Amino acid sequence: MSENESARHWYVVHTYSGYENKVKANLEQKVQSMGLENEIFEVIIPVKDEIEKKDGVEKVTQRKIFPGYVLVNMIVNEKTWYDVRNTDGVTGFVGSGTKPIPLTEDEVDNILKEMGIEKAKVKLDIDVEVGETVKICSGPFENFAAKVISINEEKGKIKALVDMFGRETNVELDFDQVEKD
């Protein structure tokens, strides 16, 4: 995971009422035309399937969970903030002033769960076991060696001990932050 990737978060964008689909299409078009694929990753309109009965016929319809809002998975910098903010139909980010506030991982998980989407589980690309030493390939401990003390495949995390200044420090790392030593 690059430094840029660690800055990637989900943000809530406020839209004019009823413009959610248009904003999603406009943002996706902007990402393509301006080459922002490495900064704006995904745009979601939180919807939930509901069964409506009309004249004895069941019909599945999609109801917006948060009308007037769109979720954007992106890296916020001055350019991306400006590009999203100035997309037709967008009234602004949810946050204080010019500083959008990212959603927490739990909030994102809850929204995806409500939509009926289970977050894809991260698969371990390298075969590592507890007790083995791995090399950290990104983040603040880049190029350090670490001894694996636990593996959480559900969350895609490894807990490891890093030797810093003669002391072992407990760190939590994503699977894609380590490689087999």
Image (cartoon, rainbow, N blue to C red):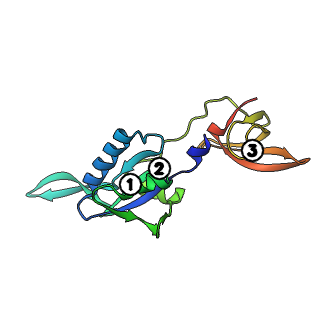
The residue identified by callout 1 is 84
According to the picture, the residue beneath numbered tag 3 turns out to be 141
Mark 2 or 1, nearer chain start: 2
Residue 95 drawn above or below residue 85: below
Disc 3 to disc 2, how far (Cα)? 24 Å
Q: Of marks 3 and 2, which one's residue comes earlier in the chain?
A: 2
Residue occupying the point 44% across, 56% down: 81
Mark 2 sits on what residue? 74
Question: Foreground: 109 or 94?
Answer: 94
Q: Quadrant of residue 176?
A: top right
| Disc on the earlier residue, 1 or 3 | 1
Residue type of the residue flagged with mark 3 = Phe
Evaluate whether residue 49 shows in this view.
no
Mark 2 crowd level (few <14, some 14–19, many ≥20, 10 Å Cα): many
Disc 1 marks a residue whose amino acid type is Val
Of the two numbered discs 1 and 3 in the rendering, the one whose residue sits closer to the viewer: 1
Give coordinates of residue 113: x percent, y percent: 42, 54
Asked whether residue 124 appears in the rendered view, the answer is yes
Secondary structure under tag 2 reads strand
Q: Are marks 1 and 3 in contact (CB under 8 Å)?
A: no
Residue 75 in the image: state x and y as whole percent. 50, 50
For badge 2, the amino acid type reads Met
Residue furthest left in the image: 55
Report if the CB atoms under discs 2 and 1 are less than 8 Å apart: yes
Q: CA distance from mark 1 to mark 3?
A: 33 Å
Q: In terms of secondary structure, where does tag 3 sit?
A: loop
Callout 1: 10 Å neighbours few (<14), some, many (20+)? many
Q: Nearer the viewer, mark 2 or mark 1?
A: 1
| Quarter residue 84 falls in | bottom left
Direction bottom: furthest residue:
96
